[in-house]
Image (cartoon, rainbow, N blue to C red):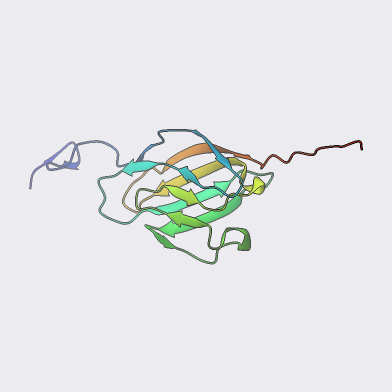
């Protein structure tokens, strides 16, 4: 193995970081439907990533934290049986509620990498339209 500029020759020289891509930063869903908050990442590390999704509020709410697809800790009651985390970091929210509306921050980190991948996706949840009819008989 030869070294150049402090790197192993089989790897590109540079800072190790998680590079994250978010194809769509604005997602629209409807109450009772699903929303796919899609991200992907790349890293030279073979370790599983720690993925953290938070909903921005006055005080941010952790939606889910996982190592790969395995959820760490206990989910908040409002998210139980409603979320799925994919290997690439994407979050699927089932049975959308109006309270799911907002900006979601995602953070993907890997032990070997110096820098964490971070990004945001805004989800708009449309409520079901109710119509009222007034009849004068």
18 lies left or right of 80: left
The answer to whether 107 is drawn above or below residue 81 in the figure is above
Left or right: 40 in relation to 106: left
Q: Toward which corner of the image does residue 80 lie, by quadrant? A: bottom right
Q: Position of residue 125 (x, y in %)?
A: 61, 40
Q: Which residue is drawn at 47% across and 64% down?
A: 72
Up the image or down, 65 lies above or below 125; here it is: below
> Which residue is drawn at the image coordinates 53% and 58% (left, top)?
82
Residue 42 drawn at (x, y percent): 30, 42
Q: Quadrant of the C terminus?
A: top right
Q: Residue 18: tell me if it is visible.
A: no
Quarter location, residue 46: bottom left
Q: Residue furthest left?
A: 1
Seen from this angle, which residue lies furthest right? 137
Q: Nearer the viewer, residue 11 or 98?
A: 98
| Number of numbered discs overlaid on the protein picture | 0
Q: Which of 107 and 30 is in front in this view?
A: 30
Q: Quadrant of residue 17?
A: top left
Task: Decide: is 110 above or below 20.
Answer: below
- Can you name the residue that lies furthest to the front here? 137
The x, y position of residue 129, in whole percent, is: 69, 39
Whether residue 25 is visible to the viewer of this picture, yes or no, is yes
Q: Between 132 and 120, which is closer to the camera in this rendering? A: 132
Q: Give the percent coordinates (x, y) of residue 5.
A: 18, 36
Q: Horizontal placement of 70 versus 94: left or right?
A: left
The residue located at (81%, 37%) in the rendering is 133
């Amino acid at each position: 193995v030869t070294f150049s500029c402090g790197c192993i020759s089989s790897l590109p020289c540079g800072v190790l970081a998680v590079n994250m891509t978010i194809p769509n930063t604005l997602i629209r869903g409807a109450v009772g439907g699903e929303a796919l908050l899609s991200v992907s990442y790349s890293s030279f590390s073979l370790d599983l990533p720690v993925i953290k999704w938070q909903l921005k509020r006055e005080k941010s709410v952790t939606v889910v934290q996982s190592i790969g697809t395995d959820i760490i800790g206990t989910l908040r009651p409002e998210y139980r049986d409603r979320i799925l985390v994919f290997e690439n970091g994407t979050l699927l929210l089932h049975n959308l509620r109006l309270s799911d509306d907002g900006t979601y921050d995602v953070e993907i980190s890997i032990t070997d990498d110096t820098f964490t991948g971070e990004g945001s996706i805004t989800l708009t949840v449309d409520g079901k339209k109710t119509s009222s009819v007034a009849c004068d008989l």
